[in-house]
Image (cartoon, rainbow, N blue to C red):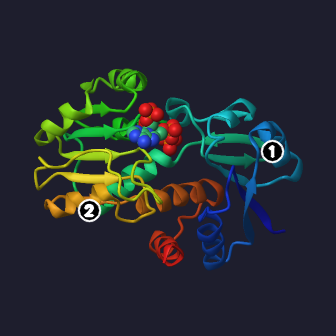
Amino acid sequence: MEKVFGLLGHPVGHSMSPLIHNNAFLKLGIEARYHAFDVKPEFVKEAIDGIRALNISGCNVTVPHKIAVMDFLDEINDEALQIGAVNTIVNKDGKLIGYNTDGRGYVKSLLDETEEDIREKSVLIIGAGGGARGVVTALLRHGVGNIEFTNRTIEKTIPLVKLAKEFHVPSATIEKEVAEENLINYDVIINTTSVGMSPNIHHSPLSLKLLKTDTIVSDLIYNPLETKLLQEAKERGGKTVNGIGMFVNQAALSFEHWTGVKPDITQMKKNVLQQLG
Ligand code: ATR
């Protein structure tokens, strides 16, 4: 019988997850369908009960439900607990297990696209929301040399500094202006905020005037593909990594949790690029 997978989010109209997962099912000859479910925040519990009642095989979870779903699952794996959010649910014989593939997806795309070893590297994270939490957890689990945080609301970085301490990785919170004056200190700069996302494409979260040319500048945003931050980095000779790799890699890791099969990431990227035009 055809299996059913889905996305729980609100809104979900522009999501490209159905496109890439349905394509991967088709290519691999897996009898399954992936559907985006628009779930209002007051119905999160009912949606999770619905997975059980309808025997849906697995789901992705996106904004704004990644934290809320945690209360209604049967088990949450260690990494998702550490991140404090779930983006993937697996229905294992009626038991719902939560995972988080966002951070690992990001680190895989960073390593694949730069072919650099980031283990002793010094990293600057811009932002301190859910996106930052996933990326920082995965970077710490992978191993980085040093990690610093800057955010519009500076107090929000406190949990990230605490997390770095748990991994015995030196860390600090700094003002944006101080980071901008000291860009020479960083090997990798990662924007996890929504600043620069379409339609606000002329905004940038950080001035890169003092960027050194071998610094990697990366943005979780993939619409537009090249944000103002990445454009400036390129102009200054820096290497850039856009958000498409994270999007398809987190999807591929979810797909693997559900089916045990690795989908074709290059094909997934092509689907997204085609859709973006
Ligand atoms: P996500 O789950 O996508 O990370 P989030 O948890 O709402 O979303 O976090 C959004 C991040 O983008 C935060 O770091 C936020 O800064 P604040 O903590 O000060 O809110 C940052 N952000 C969003 N809009 C911003 C803006 N216009 N200028 C600077 N930072 C912004």
Q: Residue at x 60, y 59 (%)?
A: 255
Quadrant in the picture for residue 125: top left
* Image x and y of residue 199, in percent: 47, 59
Question: Three-letter amino acid code at disc 2?
Answer: Gln
- Report x, y in % for residue 196: 39, 53
Residue 105 to residue 237: above or below = above
Decide which of 138, 19 is in the foreground and name it.
19
Q: State the image coordinates of residue 270 (x, y, percent, origin top left).
A: 47, 76
The residue shown at (22%, 58%) is 232
Q: For residue 47, which numbered disc appears in the image?
A: 1
Q: Quadrant of residue 228?
A: bottom left
What secondary structure is marked by label 1? helix
Q: Up-down: is 148 above or below 209?
A: above
- Horizontal arrangement in the rendering, residue 233 relative to residue 44 (left or right): left
Q: Nearer the viewer, mark 1 or mark 2?
A: 2
Task: Mark 2 and ligand 1: say if the CB distance to the nearest ligand atom is below 8 Å.
Answer: no
Q: Earlier in the sequence, mark 1 or mark 2?
A: 1
Q: Determine which quarter of the picture holds residue 113.
A: bottom left
Q: Where on the image, by quarter, is ligand 1?
A: top left
Q: Which residue is mark 2?
A: 231
Residue 11 in the image: above or below residue 69: below
